[in-house]
Amino acid sequence: MSQVNGKSERKRIAWVFLLFGAVAWGWNSYSSAQEERRAELAQIAVEIEAERRLQDTKARAAREMAAIADAAERERAADLSGPERVALGAALQHLREVDRLLLLDWKGQDLRSSKRADVARGRPYRVDVYQEDGARTTTRARVDLDRDERWDEEWVFEPDGGVRRKLAPNDDEDFKVFEVWTGERFVREGS
């Protein structure tokens, strides 16, 4: 019987060692997995930080570009200032606000780009101004009087200082009325 008890005892001890070995192996595997997960999370944190820095850089560049555009806008507005602008503004008082905007602020101005979109931001109408390749100043403008994404007027600023505009009276981008600026008012072409 003592031999059987010794064999049973050895089996129990072997099972205990086997169990401890399995627990140790499991703990080692768990620790390794946790270490890998920590390394993976650290890499993700580095990537997130790099993306945040990139977005901050882009946002800073966008703010700088907006500041440059605002400075150019102020410089452009200062080109026609003082008594000349006041006198011209008074002479144009009978015109619509959008007409005064284009004649006072954009006619003869260097856009320093091919297009400036929505230069009437915050107003009930939309105005885009354009400067064709090779031109030194604004060459044309498009007006959407009710911001319905259909152009109601197209303006052309001639190199000699003249201004023409085409009107779509039915708000359908079908320009049927043609007018010329006389220096005081618009008159239909051919009248």
Image: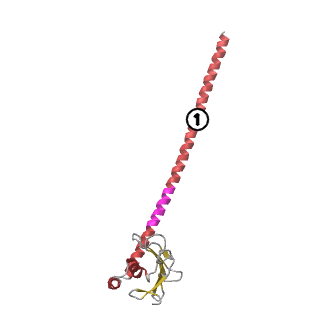
Residue ID at (57%, 33%) = 27
Is residue 51 found inside the magenta-colored segment of the image?
yes
Query: How far across and down, in percent of the image, does residue 83 sit?
Result: 32, 85
Say which element carries label 1. Answer: helix
Q: Position of residue 124 (x, y in %)?
A: 40, 71
Residue 182 appears left or right of 24: left
State which quadrant residue 36 falls in: top right
Instruction: Note whether 45 is above or below 141 in the view shown.
Output: above
| Left/right of residue 41 with respect to residue 83 in the rendered view | right
Dividing the image into 4 quarters, which one contains the C terminus?
Answer: bottom left
Q: Nearer the viewer, residue 35 or 131?
A: 131
Relative to 9, residue 122 above or below = below
Magenta span dominant secondary structure:
helix
Q: Which residue is the extreme one toward the front?
A: 170
Q: Quadrant of residue 90?
A: bottom left
Q: Amino acid at mark 1?
A: Asn
Q: How many marks?
A: 1
Q: What's drawn in magenta, residue-wise? A: 50-63
Q: Depth check: give the residue in front, 24 or 76.
A: 76
Residue shown at the point (55%, 43%) measured from the top left: 37
Query: Local crowd at mark 1 within 10 Å, few (<14), some, or many (≥20)?
Result: few
Pointer 1 residue:
28
**Point 51% across, 83% down: residue:** 135
